[in-house]
Image (cartoon, rainbow, N blue to C red):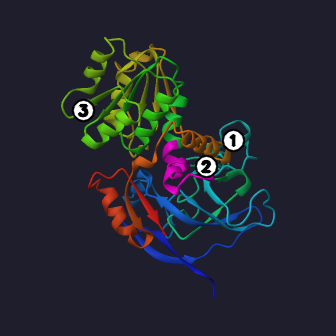
């Protein structure tokens, strides 16, 4: 009889339940990690609601912290019992996408086309991290040892939320002295705010209406916070910038309203860096797009993964320059994962991120 483990399983839209699955077999290039902490992402909620399609029976989740339980026969440089994380995106390092520098798109090619979400495999095309054990493919490209002295919660945001948020600032090419607007201060938006601060932006305008998130935005580096429930954020950002507009706007929610607002606040030649996961078509208003004559850039980014990305993020945490552990507001055992989804999906009780411990 195979050894069984508990796992959060997608049954159908509206139903993710705790069930049992066999512990995965380990192939030559794989590693099996025993998950010590994981979390729920907004993308998991899109799966729960049926807004992003995955196969029924899939284990969800893509943000693992754990301990190596077993290594594949061809894996070297690691040892069993070692604390590690793996990014939400797991590039092989040998694909065309990886070798042209787009590691996040590794695995996205199917024949002559591409499937949505590029190289995102955990909880999308293979079983994910909301379980007692997780099989990590291409382990030597993806396992990142956790530095001594860092807790699970300190590194829990690195696999996705921190990597994605920081990439919003990186893809937008934020420079020293820039003015940046970040639309929405959920976990990814908060990390985008922190990323803009670390890259040298001196005016960072966070758009949010939830008081606790507005306060957290200031802790993460925002110099101004605009409450969109009280003022028009586009008008207010134009006022703050004396009509100049922002150098970079980061859209971190995935709605037409926030995407359009992020476009409207750009200065001529500015960049809209889009991080949102969109579940319906977007439209670009003619005036906001300056009829195509504004020298603006619109760039999208999928969470960078791989062990070097994870190493850099954990170094940022270890240096004390960013504290993402404060984003963890709630704790649940894996046995209560369904309650955790109910809380997180309905954004109750001031939740930002939930730590799930098997």
CA neighbours of label 2 inside 10 A, class few (<14), some (14 to 19), many (20+): many
Residue 160 among magenta residues: yes
- Mark before the other along the chain sequence, 3 or 1: 1
As displayed, is residue 214 above or below residue 338? above
Where residue 41 appears, x then y in whole percent? 44, 53
**Residue at disc 1, secondary structure:** helix
Element under label 3? loop
Camera-nearest label, 2 or 3: 3
Residue 184 in view (yes/no) = no
Residue 202 belongs to magenta span = no
For the record, the magenta segment spans 146-162
Mark drawn on residue 119: 2
- Does the residue at mark 1 contact the one at mark 2 (Cβ under 8 Å)? yes
Q: Nearer the viewer, mark 3 or mark 1?
A: 3
Q: Mark 2 and 3 residues: CB-CB less than 8 Å, in contact?
A: no
Q: Which residue is mark 1?
A: 97
Pinpoint residue 108: horizontal percent, then vertical percent: 62, 48
How many neighbours does mark 3 have within 10 angstroms: few (below 14), some (14-19), or many (20 or more)?
some
Classify 164 as above or below 8.
Answer: above
Number of the label disc, if any, that sits on residue 228: 3
Locate the N terminus by quadrant. bottom right
**How far across and down, in percent of the image, does residue 312 sit?**
62, 40
Q: Give the CA distance from mark 2 to mark 3.
A: 34 Å
**Which structural element holds mark 2?**
loop
Marks 3 and 1, Cα distance to the nearest angstrom?
39 Å
Q: Which mark is residue 185?
A: none
Front-lying residue, 88 or 264 = 88
Q: Quadrant of residue 260?
A: top left
């Amino acid at each position: 009889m195979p050894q069984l483990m508990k796992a959060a399983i997608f049954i159908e839209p509206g139903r993710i339940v705790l069930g049992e699955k066999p512990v995965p077999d380990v192939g030559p290039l794989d590693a099996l990690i025993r998950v010590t902490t994981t979390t729920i992402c907004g993308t998991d909620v899109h799966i729960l609601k049926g807004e992003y399609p995955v196969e029924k029976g899939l284990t969800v989740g893509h943000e693992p912290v754990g301990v190596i339980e077993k290594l594949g026969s061809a894996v070297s440089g690691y040892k069993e019992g070692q604390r590690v994380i793996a990014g939400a995106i797991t590039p092989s390092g040998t694909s065309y996408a990886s070798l042209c520098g787009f590691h996040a798109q590794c695995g996205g090619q199917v024949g002559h086309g591409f499937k949505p979400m590029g190289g995102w495999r955990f909880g999308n095309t293979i079983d994910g991290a909301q379980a007692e054990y997780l099989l990590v493919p291409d382990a030597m490209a993806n396992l990142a040892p956790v530095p001594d002295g860092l807790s699970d919660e300190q590194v829990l945001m690195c696999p996705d939320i921190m990597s994605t948020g920081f990439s919003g600032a990186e893809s937008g090419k934020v420079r020293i002295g820039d003015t940046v607007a970040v639309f929405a201060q959920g976990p990814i938006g908060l990390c985008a705010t922190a990323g803009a601060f670390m890259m040298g932006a001196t005016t960072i305008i966070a758009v949010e209406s939830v008081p606790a998130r507005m306060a957290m935005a200031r802790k993460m580096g925002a110099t101004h916070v605009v409450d969109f429930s009280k003022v028009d954020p586009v008008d207010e950002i134009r006022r703050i910038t004396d009509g100049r507009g922002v150098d970079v706007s980061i859209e971190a929610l995935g709605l037409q309203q926030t995407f359009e607002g992020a476009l409207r606040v750009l200065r001529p030649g500015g960049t809209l860096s889009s991080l949102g996961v969109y579940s319906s078509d977007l439209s670009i208003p003619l005036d906001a797009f300056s009829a195509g004559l504004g020298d603006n850039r619109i760039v999208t980014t999928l969470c960078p993964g791989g062990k070097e990305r994870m190493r850099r993020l954990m170094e940022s945490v270890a240096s004390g320059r960013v504290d993402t552990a404060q984003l963890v507001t709630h704790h649940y055992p894996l046995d209560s994962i369904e309650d955790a989804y109910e809380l997180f999906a309905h954004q109750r009780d001031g939740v930002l991120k939930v730590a799930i411990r098997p």
